[in-house]
Amino acid sequence: MKLTLLLSLALAATTTSFSNATPLDDGIGAVSLILNPDYVHNTPTQIQKLNKRYPNIKIKAGEGPVPAGTGEVGLVNVNPDLEYYGAVKVGTPAQTLNLIFDTGSSDIWFPSTSCSTAACKDHTRFNPSKSSTYKKDNRPWKIEYGDGSFANGYLASEIVNVGGVSVRQTVGLAKNVSEKLKDSPEDGIFGLGFDALLSVKGVNTFMDNAIATSGKNKTKGGVLKQPVVSVFLPSLRKNGGRNGHVLFGGIDHSRYNGQLHYVPVTQKGFWQVKLDAFKTPTLPFNKTSNPAHTGTKPAWIEHVTPKQDAILDTGTTLIILSTSAAKEIHSSIPGATLDPKLGYLVPCSLRNIPSSSAIGFKLNGKYFKVPLADLAFEAVDGETGKTCLSGVQGGQEGLWILGDVFIKNNYCVFDYSPLNPRVGLAPIKY
């Protein structure tokens, strides 16, 4: 339902369990990501919606959250890596809803049984009358997206359980959901941003409540072992899109190579970080014929961006950069073109290029790569087509967005420590 590449999708979710080498400790919760390949969609429509995902990004710095356990939530991977969501339990006894875990927003919301629109009826609706832990709040609540879609209703207090981590949480219960959200596969949104993004001021985020620290930065009743949410987004190309998860309160060290490299958050709201530079490979890509490997030419061309910030957003499918940056990247790719309606297109044959051929983004002094193979995101002329939508698009002249195309290549640890919020990054390990 969040304005990702997916507002026009329809999906019947399947469920598989996330397997872990060792049992989870108390204070750690995990939600599994589950692959569902049986899905057809409309790329032009999705791109139109995606381009309106962030009409205006202006976030003020705010004070926020920290330390304390662990829950794991498996994720549904909507083919082909379009978005990821997982099962969340709400109320007592628990009612299960499929929610997108979204670091680009902060509200938790889903439809209630008081909503009778077609969009609500096509989704799981939470029934307050069947929960013994439901508490009325009655403050009005609403959320709007850049394409004109919306949901509105009222606030309530309930027990929210993610992978075994339970918190009493203020949530938005939708009484009205716009028709544009009717075919979305997920029931609602689980926001993981900071409190500055909340629709209603004075409400704590889920992570505020799960961390629950005092002013002296000491835990007072927090349920998490660590003040972190770790994200492993699977890749259809690399591992069949399976076994993804969101881990609350812990870090799965088996899911990345090397050591985590931490990048400070420059402004709390979104997970906003400074982007030092990006780099593009020299041509041609063939290692034996590329002058970059003969010493006559550098292997990479670096484009320094000293005043550029970006956000790491699990709720956006693609990487969205400025018009000029997108042009620089695609000028290094033979056969790339700019379609006036779809955006940048690339040859689907990029999928056959070794992962060593990549673009890179420099964060806090270190480059993190995205293989050119992942820029051939999806065929636009049939499943066996020759032309693919690029995983990198332009038009974002403010904050750049490092969406799922970036995150499925780089394990992300979102650290909510109040005095030092940061993102830990490392190349993902399948």
Image (cartoon, rainbow, N blue to C red):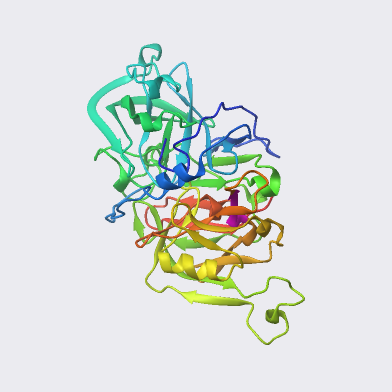
**Who's the residue at 58% across and 38% down the image?**
77
Q: Is residue 187 left or right of residue 29?
A: left
The tally of labels here is: 0
Q: Is residue 167 above or below residue 136?
A: below
Extent of the magenta region: 374-378
Q: Is residue 94 above or below residue 249?
A: above
x and y, in percent, of residue 316 in the image:
46, 47
Q: Which of the pair 194/120 is nearer the observer? A: 120
Determine if residue 239 is in view.
yes
**Who's the residue at 31% across and 20% down the image?**
135
Q: Is residue 416 above or below residue 126?
A: below
Q: Is residue 69 left or right of residue 350?
A: left
x and y, in percent, of residue 392 in the image:
51, 58
**Who's the residue at 55% across and 46% down the image?**
231
Determine if residue 409 is in view.
no
Q: Which quadrant would the N terminus be assigned to in this image?
A: top left
The furthest residue to the top:
130
Q: Which of the pair 295/391 is nearer the observer? A: 391
Q: Is residue 426 left or right of residue 430?
A: left
x and y, in percent, of residue 4 in the image:
44, 43
Give the overall secondary structure of the magenta segment.
strand
Quarter occupied by residue 35: top right
Quarter occupied by residue 387: bottom right
